[in-house]
Every structure is written in C-alpha cells, then in structure tokens.
Image: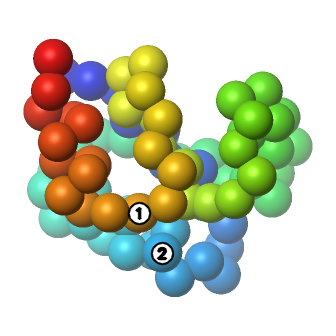
Amino acid sequence: MKRVVLYVKDKCPHCKDAQRYLDSKQIPYRLCNAKMQRGRKELDAIGARSVPVLKIGDRLMIGWNPKNFDRMYSSN
C-alpha cells in the first residue's frame, strides 16, 4: 500500500473533494494544511504552488482528478 499525503487549504473545494474521495474509499492518508508552517514548508520543498497536492508514494499529483489518482495509487 502506498503512503498518501494530501496537502490542502481550508476553503479549497477541490481539496474537500479529494478528502471526501479518500475517505469514501477508506484510503489512509496524512492531511497536511498548507496554511500551517509544516505544510507550507513541505509544499515549498516539493515546489508546489497550488493545492490540492497529493503525494502518492514517491510521485506527485497536482490538482484533483479521481481517475488519475486511482491510476497512480494502483500502479506499481
């Protein structure tokens, strides 16, 4: 199982969609708020400037697309 980190901001509707999707599929993930110091530092380190960002194993997905997530999550 790949480790998933979801980077969000509080009022982002796409972030909420991603979070609801992961919850509905019972996929464990670490939620990291980009407004908090740790979240901003992590996003800066990976070079992302917008949310949502999902770190799936060692790969990044910027933006939310359930089909792309499923493909990345299930690939080897």
Instruction: Determine the secondary structure under disc 2.
Output: helix
Q: Residue at x 27, y 24 (%)?
A: 2
Using the rendered view, name the quadrant where residue 28 is placed. Answer: top left
72 on left or right of 60: left
Answer few, some or many: residues within 10 Å of disc 2's Cα (few below 14, many 20 plus, some between 14 and 19).
some
Question: How far across and down, in percent of the image, does residue 36 sit?
Answer: 81, 51
Using the rendered view, name the quadrant where residue 27 is placed. Answer: top left
Q: Residue at x 71, y 44 (%)?
A: 48
Q: Residue at x 22, y 35 (%)?
A: 73
- What quarter of the picture does the C terminus occupy? top left
Question: How far across and down, in percent of the image, does residue 9 sit?
Answer: 67, 66
Residue 64, numbered circle? 1
56 on left or right of 13: left
Residue 14, numbered circle? 2
Q: Residue at x 81, y 58 (%)?
A: 35
Question: How far across and down, in percent of the image, does residue 71 sit?
Answer: 17, 42
Q: Is residue 23 visible?
A: no
Query: Where is 57 relative to 72, above or below?
Result: above
Give the distance between the C-alpha atoms of the residues marked 2 and 1, in whole angstroms: 6 Å
52 on left or right of 73: right
- What quarter of the picture does the N terminus occupy? top left
Viewer-proximal residue, 75 or 39? 75
Answer few, some or many: residues within 10 Å of disc 1's Cα (few below 14, many 20 plus, some between 14 and 19).
some
Asked if marks 2 and 1 touch (Cβ < 8 Å), the reply is: yes
Query: Where is 36 relative to 1, above or below?
Result: below
Q: Amino acid at mark 1?
A: Trp
Query: Where is 73 relative to 31, above or below?
Result: above
Q: Exactly how many numbered labels are in the figure?
A: 2
